[in-house]
Amino acid sequence: MSEYKSILITGGAGFVGSSLGIALKKDLEGTRVVALDNLRRRGSELNLDRLRSYGVEFQHGDIRNKEDLKDIPSFDLILDCSAEASVHAGYNSDPSYVLNTNLVGTINCLQAARRHDADIIFLSTSRVYPIARLQSLPLETIKKRFSISYSSSGTGWSYNGISTNFPLDGFRSLYGTTKLASELLLLEYAELYGLRVIINRCGVLSGPWQMGRIDQGFVSLWAAMHKFGGQLKYMGFGGNGYQVRDVLHVSDLYALLRKQMSMFETTQNSTFNVGGGHENSISLAELSDLCKKTTNNSIKILSDPHTTKADIPYYVTDNAVLHKIFDWKPKKNVNIILDDIMDWLTEYENSLQPIFLQNPF
């Protein structure tokens, strides 16, 4: 494994960034880990004590401001976890924040990596794939979910999920566009300046310390609403909750990143799809049943059949390439993920209940 002496995590007080930072600090004795975050998202402040307790240094800053990155001591790896991660960003609202964070912020991170000759692992998103193409997949309804037939396949898609060969032509939201543009910039910097980069197009990530909302972090949101008695709604595609996503526990993502860190020399400048895979896919309706069973609480779930421009009915990751190259596959299934989240909600109920019971819509 590369002997990294100092690691910078952007978005380091968020759910993914803080989880990875703590795990790295536990495993890499003597490695400095710095978490940079602007604390814009409510709930991220709860991670500060956790970070400090494990020896992760916190730096308040914003990747939109290049001066904030200049204040960071020398580092040899950036884990770029920062983003405005809502696919609805810019719809009926000012797009400035998503553009500046996801695009200008990437440029600033690349410039910082150049100064320090640092490696970059960039967390991109499955939403780089065009909305219309995902909406046109030949889905069938089986019980309480949409599904692709085992015998169906096309360019970049099959029963096993979506691969990086899936076509990229078409519209994908400002969120997806800024992440795809960032991917292109990363590869250009790698070619022009000799930087080493790895791009991971992540599906749904989940686990404890995720402050879920309707547009991101749906598993923790569903769990919290069932536990605390909040309001939920099936939105789009008939309002039945049949839309499907695969879910990856953040600890499984960490296991993959450790393998990627050790194999940078042979896998640099590559792009991977990363997710829970078909075995860890679930629909909202199925998740509701699972939450009801876990909590013994049944809540009324509203229904809105209207499908917005940003919505997609189905996304499952094809992890075959990851398994072949890194000998990696997820270890925590949806049941374990939900149990971990429920344990966290119970332990920190007094702090978390008011955050989750904000209007998630």
Image (cartoon, rainbow, N blue to C red):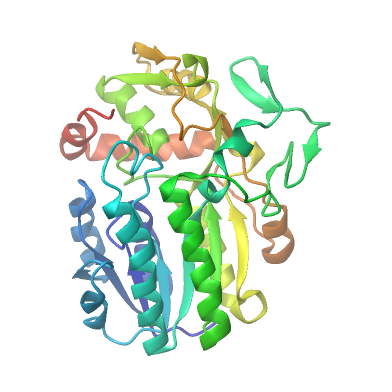
Query: Which quarter of the image is occupied by the C terminus?
Result: top left
Q: Name the residue at 25% across, 24% down.
A: 228
Rendering coords of residue 103 (x, y %): 38, 63
Q: Name the residue at 67% across, 17% down.
A: 142
Q: Name the residue at 33% across, 67% down.
A: 105
Rendering coords of residue 16 (x, y %): 38, 55
Front-most of 360 and 297? Answer: 360
Residue 101 placement: quadrant: bottom left
Residue 271 placement: quadrant: bottom right
Query: Which quarter of the image is occupied by the N terminus?
Result: bottom right
Judge whether 94 appears above or below 200 on screen.
Answer: above
Does 272 sit left or right of 350 as displayed?
right
Residue 76 placement: quadrant: bottom left
Q: Name the residue at 55% across, 70% down.
A: 198
| Viewer can see residue 54 | no
Judge whether 225 appears above or below 34 on screen.
Answer: above
